[in-house]
Image: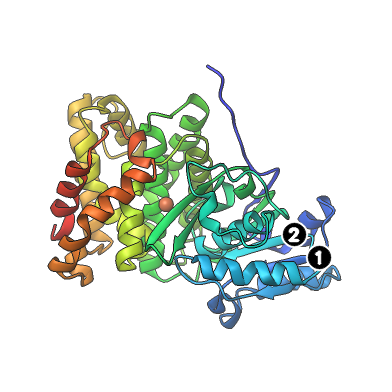
Amino acid sequence: MVVQLVAPRVMLMGGGAVARLAEVLAQLGLSKPLVVTDPFMVSSGLLDRALAPLRAAGITAAIFSDTVPDPTDTVIEAGVKVLRGGDFDCLIGFGGGSPMDTAKAMTILAAAEPGTHIRAFKVPAAANRAALPVICVPTTAGTGSEATRFTVITDTERDEKMLIAGLGALPLAAVVDHELTFGLPPRITADTGIDSLTHALEAFVSKRANPVADDYARSAMRLIAPNLRRVWADPGDAVAREAMMRGATLAGLAFSNSSVALVHGMSRPVGAHFHVPHGMSNAMLLPAVTAFGLEAGRARYAEAARVMGVASESEGDQAACAKLVEALRAWNRDLAVPTPSGFGIAAADWERVLPTMAQQALASGSPANNPRVPDAEQIVALYREVFAG
Ligand SMILES: [Fe+2]
């Protein structure tokens, strides 16, 4: 078996790593960054943690801070205008998944003919070209976007979260510093943490799993599972925050080199239509979608349960699988993850878009990687099952 592995050229990981951002740029011969971030990073002062070391190195960074949660095609176009209007040699995506994904999409679109829409790059197209290299600095643990060849952008005309994949979306470097996550509120901590656990689990059970991605996935699950409740209960728990951050990046490497599967396939439409935060919509779906695939992927799910520490080594596959679903439900309960209904979505609104959501889920290609591949009807049934819990 030949495995193609893709990863950033440089990854700096550990507490205080962001203070060395200028060194990373210097190593790569870069000195004219456009920082892509969101208004909260500016107003909260967190962005200064990245700007201060750049200033100290004599680098003046331009800032594009208009990114939005669930980045849209229109924000990407505005960003490309800024990119084309200045003299830059790299982009720095600073923040959660949205600023990082915005920077990635900007560099992909800027490499295309003017007038091209970002939807030209959605899967199955290959987004391999980039205008400028991207350096990612995540402030959540997390989407893992700092380590992946993916970006997810909302098509505002079609209410669709598009998966865009290719080497153009792979950062040149990542600076991964868990000290940037200490101030995250519990809700975002939980949602992003479950997102990264979902990445690792989906990469591990995926039909596209391979031994290299498996090792990343196992390491990620081992780091994330025992620390989800710890960071929820105590945002300042440095040991748990560090484990979660490393786990999130390793989970990114896992799914970037394997794939995500049905949970993400079904989750993107929920985000697009109802603006449920990405990690939360994953969490809403995770127990039911896992139960749906158990029989087909039993050995893998059982091993995942053991690696996460929710089943013992001596337990058989069947028992370990049951423990996994139980553990996923318990995390949702303890981390106060709502159902779609509890989130405030009206039953009639949910029901009305189910066929569209099922179509969009299938079109993304992710469900085809699931151990058990559903048809549209089965996806609709799963959406109905999770609606009120
Ligand atoms: Fe995700």
Q: Residue 116 vs residue 255: left or right?
A: right
Residue that label 2 marks: 90
Percent across and percent down for residue 252 are 51, 45
- Asked whether mark 1 lies closer than 8 Å to ligand 1, one says no
Colour convention of the picture: rainbow
SS state under label 1 = loop
Alpha carbons under labels 2 and 1: distance apart: 6 Å
Residue type marked 1 = Lys
What residue is drawn where x is 18% and y is 49%?
Answer: 380
Residue type marked 2 = Cys
**Whether residue 201 is visible:** no
Classed neighbour count for the residue bearing mark 1: other residues with Cα under 10 Å, few (<14), some (14–19), many (≥20) = some
Q: Residue 233 vs residue 146: left or right?
A: left
What residue is drawn where x is 35% and y is 32%?
Answer: 205
Q: Nearer the viewer, residue 209 or 163?
A: 163
- View extreme (top): residue: 1
Q: Nearer the viewer, residue 97 or 45?
A: 97
Q: Quadrant of residue 161?
A: bottom left
Percent across and percent down for residue 296 are 24, 27
SS state under label 2 = strand
Q: Residue 239 vs residue 167: left or right?
A: left
Contact, mark 2 vs mark 1 (Cβ under 8 Å)? yes
Percent across and percent down for residue 258 are 47, 34
Q: Nearer the viewer, residue 11 or 233?
A: 11
What residue is drawn where x is 43% and y is 67%?
Answer: 156
- View extreme (bottom): residue: 43
Percent across and percent down for residue 12 are 67, 50
Q: Quadrant of residue 78?
A: bottom right
Q: Nearer the viewer, residue 86 or 95?
A: 86
Give the answer, above or below, for where 184 lies relative to 290.
Answer: below
Residue that label 1 marks: 32
